[in-house]
Image (tube, coloured by chain):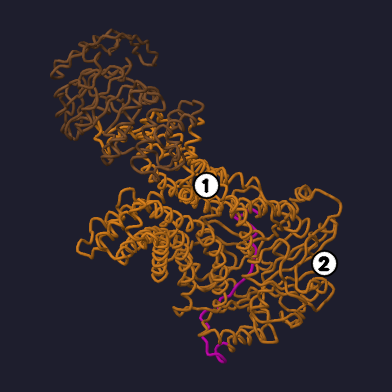
Chain colours: A brown, B orange
Amino acid sequence: MLNVDQITKVYQSGERSLKVLHDISFSIPQGQMCAIVGPSGSGKTTLLGLCAGLDTPTSGDVYINNRRLTGLSEDQLSALRNELVGFVFQSFQLIPTLTAIENVMVPLELRGERGADKMAAELLTRVGLADRLDHYPAQLSGGEQQRVAIARAFINRPVLMFADEPTGNLDSDTSESIVELLFELNRDAGTTLVMVTHDLELAARTHRVIRLRSGHILSDELTENAPVAQQAAQKPSESTDTNPTAGSQTDDASQTSSAPSAEEETIVDDAPSDSTVSREQTV
Amino acid sequence: MRFIWKMAWRETRSSISKLLLFIAAIVMGVAALVSITSFGENLDKAIEDQAKTLLGADLVIDGRMPFDEVALALFDSLGGEQAYEVRFTSMVQFPSNGGTRLGQIRALRGGFPFYGELETIPENAATTFHNSDTAALVDDSMMMQFGIEVGDSIRVGNVTYVIAGRLLSIPGESLAQGLAGPRVFIPESTLDATGLIQRGSQLYFYQYFRFDDDRDVDALVSSIEGKLNELRVDADTVEDRKLALGRALTNLTRFLNLVGFIALLLGGVGIASAVHVYIQRKVNTVAVMRCIGVSTRQAIGIYVVQSMGMGLIGAAIGSALGVGIQRLVPIVLADFLPVDIDFGISWMAIATGFLIGMVITALFALQPLLEVRRISPLLAIRRRFESGGARQPSDPLRWAIYAITAGGILLTSILLTDRIDIGLGFFGAVITAFALLSLIGVGLTRALRKWFPRNSRYVVRQGLANLYRPNNQTLAMVVTLGFSTFLLATLFLSRDMLLTQLDTGFTQNQANFVAFDIQSDQREGLRDLLERDYGLEVRQDVPIVTMRMTHINGVRAEALRDTGDVRIPNWLYQREVRATYREEITDAEKITSGEWIGYFDDFDGLVPISMEEGVAGQMGISLGDEFTFNVQGVPMQTYVASLREVDWQQVQPNFIFTFPAGVLEYAPQFHVFVTRVPDRETGAELQRDMINAFPNISIIDLDLVLGTVDAILSRVSFVIQFMALFSIFTGLIVLTGAVVSSRFQRIQESVLLKTLGAQGKQVLGIMSVEYLVLGLISALTGILLAYGAAWGLSLVVFETTFVPNWITLLALIAGVMGITVAIGLANSRDIYRKSPLAVLRSA
């Protein structure tokens, strides 16, 4: 589903360069809910940005559904995000000039799909905002805004959901209901979830927790919530450096990677990049 | 594409009022263009419709010497209905109150005008005049000046006429033409009786024709061209007049159009600045959209569509406004127009203005819209991020946009002026002016920052600091407001300069009273009147001898004119030359080459004369070239012994040709007296006495000239001020837009300040300081440029030393600052009034 292969990220600031991520590798199978935790400055958000194709790694590769992100153009990445990815942000990030329902409709409208308004209304009803469809973000409370954002994230039926501190700007009661909603929708749709948070309690409710510190993976463990199949299939290692991932990935990426997994899913990718990937996928 | 349109509309609907304000920046420019172009079209149509009334006849033949028998025979052979006019300047007097004035006398015989009418009050006055030997028609402006009514008398030379009516308009002539010399029509049958046709009188003769058989007048003129040339007369046809007038008016509308275009460009600068700020505020929205999967092209598309939509609205409003303003233009220009303008909506003009407005919006909005491309989706999850690599390389697309913008402006300039050279010149001037404005604006703001008054009060420091806030529009406002100030200041300075220059005659004890057409036998009497009765000193008594130039270097002038080897100006060819003789050069003259010969009495030899160097240069004459003059029937051979530079601004008769003393003393001649009258009352009294004693003498009272020039200037400057208004309004709209667009930030700040304990008064103070300084920098920028421009004008056009009128400039600075503060505060009033809580809740 999501494969991260030896990525590093170096920020250049003037003469000095700052290595934010060191050789990170992991892979997340479909349907898994994974939390990335770590203190401020550990590289969480940078990692999320790289996974979602918002930024390009200094070295290494990211694959979503076996599609290699490296080398894709900005517009190809946009199209890929629209097709496969959903986002939930800490600060909600609704577009202030659009009403709630319009915010939710945007991803579908982008694809030119019909019936976006109906689907959006259904989703908003599902998140409990049936009577708020035509309100502008400024007219909604924080919790309501995040519900709209979640509805927006799910409307394009993404296979991969990124959540960046989804409860960071909310009070604890509201947080609880938002998390419930997020997890519920996620389960129902079978979406893979990657969530960045510094809330360890929240992280413990996912299937898997990856701890980051200073750009290194400190630990990568399944929690007790993980389905039995996952626990059996994968025994997370102590640190990334020993995590078995694709060893010698070449640029054309046409080989089969040795992902540490069981379930097979072969996808022939028709993305307009030079990388036609056919590989085994893990669960 | 559907998505882009949809999003563009959604982005627009909630903030349409704010966006409209940005777009208002182009409204005035488009309005100016549409109104001027419409006006131009209507003018062309009026000229076409009223073509024949431009001339009042089918053909006019005019000359500077009485028509001889050959000419009259030619006129007879042409046939048709004819009229005859002799035109000259002379003093007129109103016996009822003794007022006197130099007027333009037109002694008329026959039914001129054949086309169009002499417009008069009462309406039938022209008929009365044509049927009477004792009636005159007098320019309305002069009658008002002297408080004269219809039925009063006017004296021209020795004849007194009854004023049959006020003259309002003459076909083909504008009101402004009557300002310098108010027109008086008298019957030609009384011309001799006036006693004004004497030696030295400058006379113009006109023969008007009307042909009822649709003959081709232009072909007719070509066929008799040789004869006309031989007779030293000119022929003027409707077609000629139309062309000449068209040229003049095209120049006028071209100039006005460019001023309108400047307003539009200023609006463009405002738009660029507003779009820049707008996009800065949309960074987050764009980042989120990019996360969701909107491509860069789509994101730009949304804002391009939005800008173009706004441009469309702005251009539409501007066009509608332009159609309305179009009605004002003829009022402003009425005095300069020789035709009556009918209103018509010119779709062509509307389309042109609309299109140019859209193009300018697109060009200026595009450049800041490019910033959208650089908004990374990463911004949705982090506020700021360090860029991954080194600085981004220079953007070729940005340079392409700059090039397209420059090309668009150049193309529009050429389109508007219809001339490549003028378009290029204008483009260069605009780029230079904008560059200078930006440079001065940036320099002043930098200087302010460098010498920041760190020890001043908090309110002052905060107000100044606001000018550097992120996304400030200081530069855009300095450029737009500065440009408006520049236009106005240049205008005022030039006007002051002209008036000061004319005024020196009064302030510097120079001569201010010139009497001319004095016959030799009147000299003694006039000298007595001046010296004995008025105690005035005759400063100069200049003899004038009239002659005709017949040969240059032994070749007949007529022949030379055909070959074109020597360029003989019309005045020299057709007119009698007025020359003087004297032993010394005057203070106003300087010999630049050759030798001044003051005395010569060898009647058989070549007479050494001196020639004005400018005219000599134009004609291609150099030292040693020979002229033959016919001095009242006696041929006189001369050669150019020296060239003189002449300061034409001195109040005294100046000459192209001067002869040495010794050869012309016995030629028929007349004289010019130059003196100085101490005050206006004495001048008026003297004029009255002189007219009574010597009716043929003409007087130029500089006081009156000054008043006339002032009147003409104020009409011209009214036109320019009217056009400058468009720029000023644009500047104010840009200012308003800038204030409104920074409103959110301002509200936050003022709330924060109030929460920290600032008084409403202090918040107000901070804003006042900010706008005061902004106004000051803009005004200074404009005035610095205007100072340079006026200095250049003084050097090249007015040829005088440039003494700026500081009072005008200070008033202008104060005005610009006042308006800036007023607009700024008016748009922020609820910001400083709002209570902190109300804002915190809504935020």
Please state the horizontal and vertical placement of residue B707, each as a whole percent of the image: 56, 74
Tell me the subunit letter for badge 1.
B
Residue placed under numbered mark 2 in the picture: B110
**Within the image, what quadrant is residue A64 found in?**
top left
Residue B46 counted in the magenta span: no
Residue placed most toward the observer, B441 or B80:
B441
Q: Which amino acid does label 2 sit on?
A: Gly
A131 lies above or below B170: above
Tell me the CA gap for discs 1 and 2. 45 Å
* Element class at badge 1: helix
- Residue A247 is situated, as x and y percent measured from the top left of the image, at 20, 11
Question: In this orientation, does residue B410 appear?
Answer: yes
User: Which contiguous range is marked in magenta?
Assistant: B530-556
Depth check, mark 1 against mark 2: the one in front is: 1
Q: Which amino acid does label 1 sit on?
A: Ile
Left or right: B122, with B352 as reference point: right
Q: What element carries label 2?
A: loop
Tell me the subunit letter for badge 2: B
Same subunit: marks 1 and 2? yes
Which numbered circle lies on residue B422?
1
Residue B321, x across and y down, in percent: 59, 54
Asked if residue A215 lies left or right of residue B607, the reply is left
Q: Is residue B4 above or below residue A271?
A: below
Relative placement, left or right, of A179 versus B479 is: left
Mark nearer the N terminus (1 vs 2) = 2
The 10 Å Cα crowd at callout 2, few under 14, some 14 to 19, many 20 or more, is: some
How many tags in the picture?
A: 2
**Image coords of residue A34 (percent x, y):** 25, 24
Looking at the image, the residue that sits furthest to the bottom is B533
- Residue B787, visible in the rendered structure: no
